[in-house]
Amino acid sequence: MSEKTPGQPQQPTSQKDEDAVAFARGIFELARNGGAGPLSVMLNAGVPVDMRTSEGDSLLMLASRNGHLETVRLLLESGADPETLNDQGESASSLATSDTIRSLISDWSQ
């Protein structure tokens, strides 16, 4: 009954689920759009740094894919796993849009 939409949480089956999905979408959007400040607040409040979309993309992957260096740095400093692979076998480093981000992730992995 729950249809998967790429890069989004599964569809809700109750109001509580709808609220959780809306919250998760907001967190994913912060990572995609480079919202390091608000994302930092959410992580400090207990949002899991390695939460993932329905396709297995982590917050770090979303930030890396969209070229947000400061958000990538924040996520790494907050404990994001740079070795995590999504459902397509891609990592944050392989999705990086710049050599600077790729280098930061590589240095962090060592």
Image: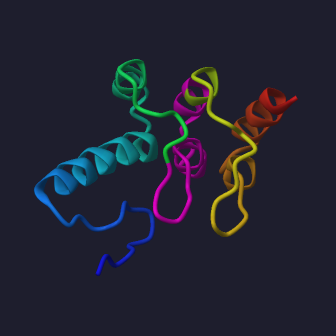
Task: Classify the position of the N terminus by image quarter.
Answer: bottom left
98 inside magenta stretch: no
- Compared across the picture, whether 83 is left or right of 24 comes to right
Does residue 21 lie above or below 109 as drawn?
A: below
Q: Residue at x 75, y 31 (%)?
A: 104
Q: Residue at x 31, y 51 (%)?
A: 25
Residue nearest the observer in this picture, 73 or 1: 1
Considering every residue shown, the one lying at the far left of the view is 15
Position of residue 3 measured from the top left corner of the image (x, y, whole percent): 34, 78
For the magenta stretch, what is the residue range?
A: 52-74
60 inside magenta stretch: yes
Residue nearest the observer in this picture, 17 or 87: 17
Residue nearest the observer in this picture, 102 or 20: 20
Residue 33 picture quarter: top left
Position of residue 41 measured from the top left corner of the image (x, y, whole percent): 35, 20
Does residue 25 lie above or below 11 as drawn?
A: above
